[in-house]
Amino acid sequence: MGKAVFDHLRADIDSVLERDPAAKSRWEVLLCYPSVKAMAYHRLAHRLYDAGHTTLARWISQHSRHVTGIEIHPGARIGRGFFIDHGDGVVIGETTIIGDNVTLYQGVTLGGTGKDVGKRHPTIGNNVTVGAGAKVLGPFTVGDGSKIGASAVVLKEVPPNCTVVGNPGRIVRREGAVKGVDLDHVHLPDPVKAHIEALEHRVDELEKQLHTNMGTEHVKEEFEHADL
């Protein structure tokens, strides 16, 4: 068990060094990053939870929340290389399952809708990135390699290698497998903006057509009233 704990800790530290250019050393990550501290607490709490010591497990998870600003229910199952950047306001529910090399940003909620029983929280695949403030709510799967944009509200299943934005979340990009972890959650398609631009273009065309028709009618009227 000791080796497993060390291996998980090392993988968590490596994930920070790989994905955060601000991280300069392992010691800095170990001492200063709330994600690493939260996961150290969680792995202990999760073992106690599985062993039936639910109250102690919950106490540890709540203590971790006060220390790190990250709330992870001890029942949640989290894979290797997990990284929460910044961390404040992150909430992960009891029946959440998270794969390997997943990245969350501040304010993310992996929660339930309040109407489900049993498996109530999402399953997050490998190499998924969830942007700041996003809410993923319900017992569905977000497929491997997918990206959830900042502030998106996702209420239904997301296939692998897709990009979701908006409230409610909409799939705006479907593409082939992306190698590794895709951290670009800034340059995302904006379907609302595209729709507005298309409407503006159509309005411009109609105004030009209207001015042309009005000019034609004016010439026609002058011709009809001319004293020939």
Image (cartoon, rainbow, N blue to C red):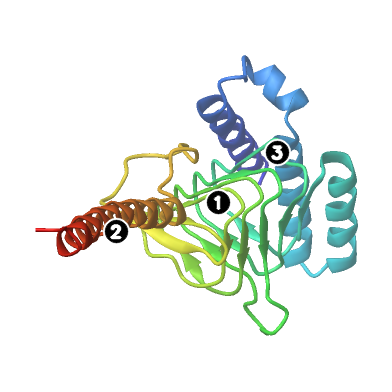
Residue at coordinates 27% horizontally, 58% vertically from top-left?
214
Upstream in sequence: badge 1 or badge 3: 3
Picture layout, residue 166 above or below residue 69:
below
| Residue where numbered disc 2 is placed | 210
Residue 35, which numbered label?
3
Of all residues, the one furthest to the front in this rendering is 227
Horizontal side, residue 101 vs residue 221: left or right: right
Q: Residue furthest left?
A: 228
Please tell me which residue is depicted at 39% across the width and 52% down the height of the picture.
200
* Residue 7 found in image quarter: top right
Badge number at residue 79? 1
**Tags 1 and 3 touching, CB below 8 Å:** no
Q: Closer to us: mark 1 or mark 3? A: 3
Nearer to us of marks 3 and 2 is 2
Callout 3 crowding tier (Cα within 10 Å): few <14, some 14–19, many ≥20: many
Relative to residue 67, is residue 16 depicted above or below?
above
Asked whether 107 or 101 is in front, the reply is 107
- Tell me where residue 123 appears, x and y as whole percent: 54, 65
Amino acid type at mark 1 = Gly
In terms of sequence position, does the residue under pointer 1 or pointer 2 come before the other? 1
Residue nearest the viewer, comparing 152 with 71: 152
Residue type at mark 3: give it: Ser
Residue visible at 52% across and 50% down in the picture: 149
Q: Which mark is residue 10?
A: none
- For image coordinates 71% across by 26% down, the residue present is 30
Element carrying mark 2: helix
Looking at marks 3 and 2 on the same chain, the residue that comes earlier in the sequence is marked by: 3
Please provide percent x and percent y for residue 21.
Answer: 56, 21
